[in-house]
Image (cartoon, rainbow, N blue to C red):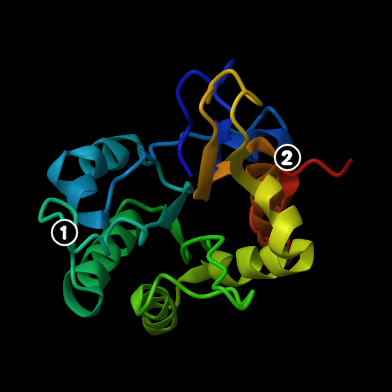
Amino acid sequence: MSNKKNSEINPERGWGQMLPQYFLKEINIENHAKNGRSTKSFIDEGRWLDVKKNIKPGDYVFIQFGHNDSKAYDPTRYVNPLTGYRSNLQHFVLESRALGAMPVLFTSVARRNFNEDGVLVDTHGLYPLMVHQLANELDVMLIDLQLISEQLILAFGLEDSKKMYLHFAPGEHPYYPDGKSDNTHFSAFGASLIAQKVVQDLAKMDVLTAYILTE
């Protein structure tokens, strides 16, 4: 979701980084996402506090976590999906609302994780379910990016879906001279597709429609 460093040479993009191309310039998009953060580390590093300082009444706050909350080998990031993860998301939602903003929850994007039989296999476990439950309980707007990204991966198929992510043969891209096979992080093509789907869902919910580019 985050703005990636060295974008002039780095082919990686976050879907949040690609959102501005679908909106009028009158809207201000502040992307506070940061690679590798979980709900826990985002709070512990003071990043949520920085977000809160910038929230104004009438703002929309887009909230997506999950990839890194599941890192059970890292005590600085891991949180139980049934307890800490759900509680942290609730914290973000309630504090956003208290500041007059409207939160929007997102499930995690899918990893391109095909097994040996060519079946796309989930890697997120209970984390997306907690997002759905919390959105239902607190009546929060929800965009199911796990479903959307899975549908895109399956539509492209086993091989063509690689172009959504970072797949380069050795010598193919100067940023990855030794090659790259990354099924988690997006290329500009993949990130733009996800951002476009997000904007389409926002329009369906009548969110920020006055600022969405129609051409």
Q: Residue at x 26, y 60 (%)?
A: 69
The answer to whether marks 1 and 2 mark residues whose Cβ atoms lie closer than 8 Å is no
In the rendered view, tell whether residue 10 sits above or below residue 128.
above
Q: Residue at x 44, y 79 (%)?
A: 132
In the rendered view, tell whether residue 107 sits above or below residue 121.
above
Identify residue type, mark 2.
Tyr
State how far apart marks 1 and 2 are (Cα).
Answer: 38 Å
How many residues crowd around disc 1 within 10 Å: few (fewer than 14), some, or many (20 or more)? Answer: few
| Residue 53 drawn at (x, y percent) | 27, 36
Residue 90 picture quarter: bottom left
Q: Residue at x 59, y 18 (%)?
A: 174
| Viewer-side residue, 96 vs 11 | 11
Task: Report the residue marked by disc 1.
Answer: 73
Nearest to viewer (mark 1 / mark 2): 1
| Residue 76 drawn at (x, y percent) | 12, 50
Kindly identify which numbered label has been placed on residue 22. Answer: 2
Is residue 76 something that shows in the picture?
yes
Identify residue type, mark 1.
Tyr
